[in-house]
Every structure is written in C-alpha cells, then in structure tokens.
Image (spheres, rainbow, N blue to C red):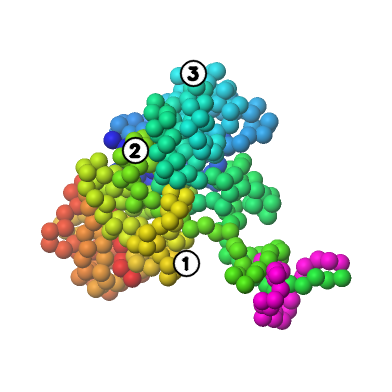
C-alpha cells in the first residue's frame, strides 16, 4: 500500500494526521532542519514522546535533518543527533553528503532518506545514492510524471517519494537566497522568512542624477514604446523600503508561486509504484493537516481499489486557504477541467473553520470556537469517519442558555447534532466548518 506522509510541526498535528489517515509523519530536528521556527519539537522530550506515540499506533515517524550546514554546525551535529538516534526515528531525512557520511559511519543501521533538497532529478542519481546506503530518495519537485516513471523503471530496488500537495518555492527545490538577501535570514540554514509570499506594491520609478532609482510621487501611465519600465517594489509591512524591479506591457513579475495540488495524479503515481506521497506544511495548522490527509487517504485507497478518480476531491481541497493551485511540473499541458482560468489568486472562499470538538454528550457537541457562526448556518462536521452536512438548529453557551451565535475565538459553546449524526470514538478529532 502506498504510504501517505503528512507534516507534523506539533504533537497535535501529528495526532490529527494519524486520525485522518496518514501512515507516517515527518517533523524537524531542532537546529538542523529547514524549518527552525519555534515549535514543540524544539524540546527533545516532546520529540521523544511523539516518536513513542507514533510507534505505539504502528505508524512511522521521520525526522528532517536536511540543513546545508556550515562548519560550525558540522562540529556539533553528531553530539546533538545522539539523543535523537536513541529515540529510534524510522528515518532521518538528509541532504548533505558530509552529514550523511558521518551518520552512516557512526550509526550504520540508521535509515536515511534523501531530502528533496539534494535535487535528485534522474535515475543515475537515485542509483548513486542507493550505493551510499540511502534507503529512499525524495525526488525533486521539478520532474514530470513521465520522468518519475522512467526513474521508477530504471531503479526498481529503491523506495521513491514525491510531493503531492503544499507550498512551492520559486527556487529549485527550495534552494533560495531571496530571504537571505532581503532579511539576512538564510533559507538554506532553516531561517526562511518566505519573502516570495509577501504582499508588494509597485511604484513607478526614475533615475536621479546619481543613477539610483527613486519612487515617482505622481505615477504616469505605462508607455508601451518603452522596452522596459523600471518600478520599485514596496512590501506591505515595510513602508519606505523600495526594491527595484522592471515592468513591461504584461505587468510586473512577482515571485509568489501557486500551491501544489496533485491529488488528480495519485492514481498514476500509485500504479507506477511510488512508495510514499508527501504533503508539505510543517508550519501549517492541525486543521490543514487533517483535511489534506483525509482527501489524499481517500485518493490512495480508491486508486488501490481500482476506482476512477473522483473530481470532487479537488473541490474538497478548495476548502483550504491557498494561493491558487497548480500541478507544478507534473504535466506540461493541463486539460481545461483541471485548470482555473478565471481566478489567479484564490483563497478559501467556500468554508471557514469555526469550531473544534471538545466532547459529545446526549447529542450535544461542545466546541472550542475558532470563528463566529450563527444559528441557521449551513455547516459541515469533519470527522475521521466521514463528513456530514446540516443546518444549525440550536446553540447554547457554557451555562446551557440558548444563544443566537457563537461569538468567536476564545469561547466554548454547545451545538445540537441532528438525528442520525453519530461521532462515536472520533469526537476528539471532529471539526466544524461553516459554509460562506
């Protein structure tokens, strides 16, 4: 069975991933992964608890240790990794040949997966890494389906993993210097500020007597006779800080990529024998982790059962906040039914996450409110056993008094579940969505 691999930035995200169908999760090793923002796994005791809990459920736990290290981090690497190895993660996700060598010399039995950061784009590279003791290669995002299939056929002995959902970088498999240039935070050391995703405004510019570009107070219309038009970019939260760019008759080219969505290709990836399908998003919420796991779990199961792809699964992913979707490099020419030609930058305009289940009793569900909702709203209850749609007929506050609306985050309310809605043992992982 094809593995579904979900991100886990917290213990809670890990639990939701497993509840909604993931076979494995991946987390980041503090200091040595490409997501060093504070999270629960910065504490070794939390990391140890997560690995133990995953193994107790018969699941896999992989640890990203995929930094491109400078000398100072090489010096401390084995020392800091030793307590992690004792936790027995199922694999380390690594990219640097030097660190891989050190790990294999000291702990030859430790499984290592080659990170996407290593940019494996051909079968010879995969075969090479197999000879270095790598058990699985995470293929570059820049490959087409045909290229992946050729790699699979040329190196049948290797486990292969590919990304199927999540954010895309503007640089080759994430090797980017933009954040380092603009904010002095190096993406290749795990400190990316996602500068490519900031909101920018374009200002018309002109050269001053020193040859520098300065903002024009009264912008003029673009002159189509000019070969290129200089503009200055100003990021929303950095007023007065301008960066030069250039605009032609087609507009200004900013860097924000759409998000990857490849659920429509799960069937083919399963048939070609890809071992693991990976969802990006270690800094995303447990809601994101649950919804993506639920959709891709169903896609994998239906592919193995020989069922045709259900286009509704693509619409299910529209309920997640996104920057618009793309299937990346998987196909050069995309059929019209898979493409959005009318909306360039989309967000979650269909549903809003409004409540997280706390307990169910006598057909009343207690919720931790995340966003306002009202009596009469059409809602969807998301559970690991399936999703159910209904209209809210009754809401109560903590004192049992009827109210017209749940006021917003920070409150707890109870809602009455319709006849026939049964949560069973999934109440701990149920979430309420409001249709907008």
Q: Earlier in the sequence, mark 3 or mark 2?
A: 3
The quadrant the N terminus occupies is top left
* Numbered disc in front, either 3 or 2: 2
Q: Tell which of 2 and 125 is nearer to you.
A: 125
> Helix, strand or loop at disc 2?
helix
Q: Earlier in the sequence, mark 2 or mark 1?
A: 2
Task: Give the CA separation, mark 2 to mark 1.
Answer: 32 Å
Residue tagged 1: 344
Quick one: label 2, few (<14), some, or many (20+) residues within 10 Å?
Answer: some
Q: Residue at x 59, y 62 (%)?
A: 254
x, y percent for residue 149 = 40, 38
Q: Is residue 123 left or right of residue 24?
A: right
Q: Tell which of 98 and 386 is nearer to you.
A: 98
**Residue 272, label in figure:** 2
Image quarter for residue 190? top right
- The answer to whether one can see residue 283 in this image is yes
């Amino acid at each position: 069975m094809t593995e579904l691999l979900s991100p886990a930035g917290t213990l809670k995200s890990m639990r939701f991933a497993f509840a909604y169908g993931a076979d494995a999760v991946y987390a980041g090793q503090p200091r040595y992964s490409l997501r060093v923002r504070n999270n629960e796994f910065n504490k070794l005791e939390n990391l140890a608890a997560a690995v133990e809990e995953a193994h107790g459920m018969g699941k896999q736990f992989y640890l990203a240790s995929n930094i491109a290290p400078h000398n100072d981090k090489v010096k401390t690497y084995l020392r800091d990794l030793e307590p992690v190895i004792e936790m027995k993660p199922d694999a380390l996700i690594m990219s640097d040949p030097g660190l891989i060598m050190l790990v294999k010399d000291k702990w030859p039995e430790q499984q290592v997966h080659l990170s996407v950061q290593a940019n494996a784009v051909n079968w010879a590279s995969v075969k090479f890494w197999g000879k270095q003791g790598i058990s699985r290669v995470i293929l570059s995002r820049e490959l087409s389906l045909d290229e992946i299939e050729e790699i699979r056929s040329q190196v049948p002995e290797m486990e292969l993993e590919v990304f199927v959902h999540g954010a895309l970088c503007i640089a080759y498999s994430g090797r980017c210097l933009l954040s380092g240039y603009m904010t002095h935070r190096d993406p290749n050391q795990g400190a990316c500020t996602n500068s490519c995703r900031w909101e920018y405004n374009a200002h018309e510019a002109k050269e001053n007597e020193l040859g520098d570009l300065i903002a024009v107070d009264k912008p003029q219309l673009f002159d189509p006779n000019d070969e290129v038009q200089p503009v200055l970019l100003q990021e929303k939260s950095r007023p007065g800080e301008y960066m030069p760019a250039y605009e032609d008759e087609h507009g200004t080219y900013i860097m924000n990529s759409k998000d990857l969505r490849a659920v429509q290709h799960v069937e083919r990836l399963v048939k070609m024998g890809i071992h693991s399908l990976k969802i990006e998003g270690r800094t995303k919420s447990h809601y994101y982790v649950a919804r993506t796991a639920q959709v891709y779990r169903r896609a994998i199961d239906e592919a193995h059962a020989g069922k045709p792809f259900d286009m509704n699964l693509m619409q299910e992913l529209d309920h997640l906040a996104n920057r618009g979707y793309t299937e990346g490099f998987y196909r050069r020419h995309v059929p019209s039914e898979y493409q959005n030609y009318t909306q360039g930058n989309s967000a979650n305009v269909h549903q809003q996450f409004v409540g997280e289940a706390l307990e169910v009793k006598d057909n009343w569900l207690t919720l931790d409110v995340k966003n306002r909702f009202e009596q009469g709203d059409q809602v969807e209850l998301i559970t690991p056993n399936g999703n159910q749609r209904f209209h809210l007929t009754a809401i109560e506050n903590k004192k049992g008094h009827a109210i017209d609306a749940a006021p917003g985050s920070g409150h707890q309310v109870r809602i009455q579940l319709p006849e026939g809605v049964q949560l069973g043992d999934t109440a701990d992982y149920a979430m309420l969505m409001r249709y907008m």
